[in-house]
Amino acid sequence: LTAHLQQYLANQSTRLVKKRRRACDIAAESSHPSFSKWWKLECVRGLKEALCGMPLWRMDDHELADHLPFEGMQESFELPDGTTVDLSPELFRTPEILFDDDDTPDPSSSLSATPHDGNRPHESHVALHKIVHASIGACDVDIRKELTANIVLSGGGAQFPFFPDRLQREVSSLIPSTFKVKVSCG
């Protein structure tokens, strides 16, 4: 258990904690809404870390299903309520959005209450590898080669299996072959 959870449970006499695989079952007659919200987010985080991933190249669902599970990945994840979530191609589609290079308008811009300003272009989704390429291209020519060899990812999404390899492959396809691309997780 995390130190935060142990401290929280130490102050509550109505708690029962039982270790079960990767999750803990917590039963309580009453719990604070902030704890319930935190616990739900922890369950989703555990599911994401256990089952979500990214293929090294774009695949359709049938092709992806033939390759699952990837080496070292779990085939299922048990939620605290006993529900089992099985590995499926849909769990790979969510992170795939980062590399989706079609210029689909941002859904939040179409839901806004204000009408579209003719002088301002519609916002669109730009693929991550294109953002990296544009950022490197906006820098001084003398440091571009060094920048491509030192791309560092951070944040929870960067921990998806094969994410650094996929970004490296996608960026490499956009830059001259004389540049060495190296992506690492920070």
Image (spheres, grey):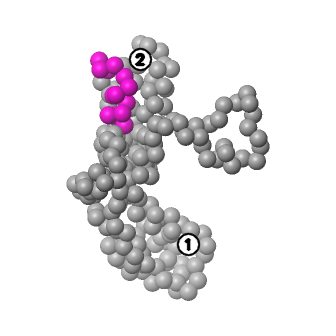
- Can you say whether 14 is above or below 51 in the image? below
Q: Position of residue 165 (x, y in %)?
A: 31, 39
Quarter the C terminus occupies: top left
Measuring 41% from the left and 13% from the top, which residue is drawn there?
A: 142
Evaluate whether residue 97 shows in this view. Answer: yes
Q: For residue 75, which quarter of the picture?
A: bottom left
Q: Helix or strand or loop: what does disc 2 sit on?
A: helix
Q: Position of residue 105 (x, y in %)?
A: 59, 40
Residue occupying the far right of the picture: 114
Query: Three-letter amino acid code at disc 2?
Result: Ile
Q: Which mark is residue 36?
A: 1
Instruction: Write down the residue under mark 2.
Output: 143
Measuring 29% from the left and 56% from the top, which residue is drawn there?
A: 65
Q: Position of residue 96 (x, y in %)?
A: 41, 46
Measuring 35% from the left and 77% from the top, which residue is drawn there?
A: 19
Q: Position of residue 3 (x, y in %)?
A: 45, 66
Please report the bounds of the magenta region as a residue range.
Answer: 167-179
Evaluate whether residue 52 shows in this view. Answer: no
Residue occupying the far left of the picture: 71
Query: Three-letter amino acid code at disc 1?
Result: Ser
Measuring 38% from the left and 25% from the top, which residue is drawn there?
A: 174
On screen, residue 52 versus residue 98, left or right, reads left
